């Protein structure tokens, strides 16, 4: 296995830690695929050439970026233009946090002035930050694996963690993590809504700062629709887009929001070697694309992921998985696409993921209750981590944010949701338009009864605002393999579904 790793490093040096970064007291440039920036006298930012990275300074303040920023109000603005405006308009880290609320993208921001030095991520942490202290030095990076290249990380001997990793709930939830720790001692993960103080070497919560704002639903729908539309248009100005469309709500909203740039988008669905053409996730978008006149492709990434590719991703990403959807990553790699893949992740914060029909009483939920919701079982490790999280989130919950919304946001998305984009970095960049703090807060202000299954009325209203014709086919119709897709749609439309 060690020989295989050495061979992979030699054969595919440009794929080693692709789209990743490292922040620390020394430059990291294992090959010509890396850019190095000096952030200040004691800190370097090193980043792979396939992820945007830059540093700007003015009047004793310095700001750095890894990834890309999108301002939905000014779609044509570049990441550098947005960053410069933020630097000019911010006099503290707190100013920067507030101004970042309106931004979309997948990014990590650094900020330094005479008194502060902070690192924080996009709202859901889809561009991840890990940090570790080893041998008297302190490092931040996109993965524990890249930190291991410069620091002596050791795997934890915690028996509770080992039991958690062997649990059925962990396996069934696609190896979903919980908490801010890692499999390595003294190596931690920066969760959403927190920043890392580099001087104190400590993660601290910065959001929410105040109660959820009150807003009329019609105004919330109007502004949320504008943010989604502007975010997708901004991304389409930078790269061609690939937008997977299924029978569900999230991808339908994004399709509707892409109306003005549809010529820059390839709409598709991937069968992953599992679904037939009659499956709703294939038949529904096929019918919808025909009605709307869109380019639509049915892909089938059924090819087994070769051993070298799976091994390389394990070298790049801690706890990298080999799932059926990993075949999509390999297919993207083989195609050599320059497109950015768009998905609906982060939307389910606002769709009551853990309580889709709003039947649970969320008052007084314990860490054990949350463990059962996340993993369908209790483990000592998960309960301990969730108890820590509950204490940290107390202020947010007292500000009107509901426990299960925050659980999905910070634990489910911050861990499980951020894992797949990291795995995809070897092949393709990802964009999640719902990953916008202003957008999330707008949708959470809307009455809960508009955000429940099965109708998700709030989402229908957004689609109606963005592209009403996209409502013409049903959402998530029952799967009846023996019936033809055309017959099912005729019946669904006849009875008014969708």
Image (cartoon, rainbow, N blue to C red):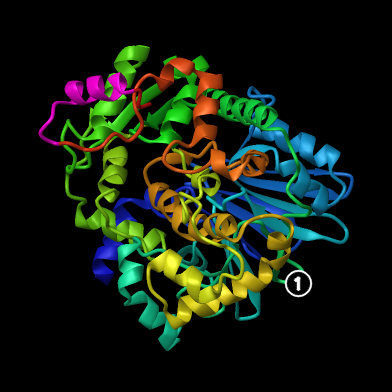
**Number of marks present in the image shown:** 1
Residue with the mark numbered 1: 200
Q: Is residue 272 left or right of residue 292?
A: left
Q: Quadrant of residue 278?
A: top left
Tell me which residue sits at (72%, 54%) in the image.
39
- Percent of width and height locating residue 405: 57, 54
Q: Main secondary structure of the magenta part?
A: helix
Q: Is residue 482 magenta?
A: yes
| SS category of the residue bearing label 1 | loop
Tell me which residue sits at (87%, 47%) in the image.
91
Foreground residue, 182 or 446?
Answer: 446
On screen, residue 351 above or below 400? above
Tell me which residue sits at (39%, 77%) in the image.
164
Foreground residue, 495 or 27?
Answer: 495
Residue 341, visible in the rendered structure: no
Image quarter where the N terminus lies is bottom left
Q: Which residues are magenta?
A: 481-495
- Percent of width and height locating residue 247: 33, 33
Foreground residue, 100 or 44?
Answer: 100
On screen, residue 110 above or below 153? above
Residue found farthest to the front: 495
On screen, residue 137 above or below 50? below
- Percent of width and height locating residue 463: 50, 25
- Percent of width and height locating residue 193: 66, 56
Q: Is residue 232 left or right of residue 60?
A: left
């Amino acid at each position: 296995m060690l020989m295989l790793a050495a061979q992979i490093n030699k054969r595919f040096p440009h794929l080693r830690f692709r789209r990743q970064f490292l922040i620390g007291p020394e430059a990291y440039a294992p090959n010509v695929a890396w850019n190095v920036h000096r952030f200040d006298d004691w800190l370097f930012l090193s980043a792979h050439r396939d992820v945007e990275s830059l540093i700007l300074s003015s009047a004793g303040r310095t700001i750095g970026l890894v990834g890309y920023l999108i301002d939905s109000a000014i779609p044509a603005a570049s990441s550098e233009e947005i960053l410069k405006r933020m630097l000019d308009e911010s006099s503290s880290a707190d100013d920067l946090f507030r101004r970042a609320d309106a931004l979309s993208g997948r990014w990590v921001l650094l900020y330094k002035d005479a008194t502060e030095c902070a690192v924080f991520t996009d709202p859901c942490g889809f561009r991840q930050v890990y940090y570790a202290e080893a041998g008297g030095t302190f490092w931040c990076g996109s993965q524990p694996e890249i930190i291991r290249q410069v620091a002596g990380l050791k795997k934890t001997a915690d028996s509770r963690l080992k039991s958690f990793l062997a649990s059925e709930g962990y396996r069934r939830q696609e190896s979903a993590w919980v908490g801010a720790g890692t499999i390595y001692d003294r190596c931690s993960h920066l969760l959403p809504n927190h920043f890392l103080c580099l001087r104190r070497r400590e993660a601290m919560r910065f959001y929410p700062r105040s109660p959820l704002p009150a807003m009329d639903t019609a105004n919330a729908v109007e502004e949320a629709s504008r943010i989604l539309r502007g975010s997708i248009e901004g991304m389409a100005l930078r790269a061609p887009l690939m937008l997977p469309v299924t029978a569900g709500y999230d991808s339908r909203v994004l399709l509707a929001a892409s109306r003005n740039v549809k010529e820059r988008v390839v709409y598709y669905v991937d069968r992953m070697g599992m679904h037939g053409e009659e499956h709703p996730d294939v038949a529904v978008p096929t019918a919808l694309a025909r009605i709307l006149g869109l380019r639509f492709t049915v892909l089938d990434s059924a090819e087994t992921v070769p051993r070298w590719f799976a091994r390389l991703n394990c070298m790049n990403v801690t706890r990298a998985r080999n799932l059926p959807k990993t075949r999509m990553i390999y297919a993207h790699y083989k195609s050599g696409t320059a497109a950015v893949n768009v998905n609906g992740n982060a939307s389910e914060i606002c769709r009551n993921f853990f309580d889709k029909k709003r039947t649970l009483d969320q008052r007084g939920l314990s860490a054990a209750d949350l463990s059962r919701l996340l993993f369908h079982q209790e483990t000592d490790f998960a309960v301990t981590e969730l108890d820590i999280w509950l204490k940290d989130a107390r202020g947010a919950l007292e500000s009107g944010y509901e426990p299960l919304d925050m659980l999905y946001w910070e634990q489910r998305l911050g861990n499980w949701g951020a894992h797949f984009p990291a795995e995809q970095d070897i092949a393709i960049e990802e964009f999640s338009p719902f990953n916008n703090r202003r957008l999330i807060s707008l949708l959470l202000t809307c009455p809960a009864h508009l955000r429940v299954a099965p109708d998700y009325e709030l989402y229908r209203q957004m689609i109606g605002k963005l592209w009403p014709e996209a409502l013409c086919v049903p959402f998530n119709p029952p799967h009846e393999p023996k019936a033809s897709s055309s017959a099912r749609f005729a019946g669904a439309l006849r009875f008014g579904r969708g």
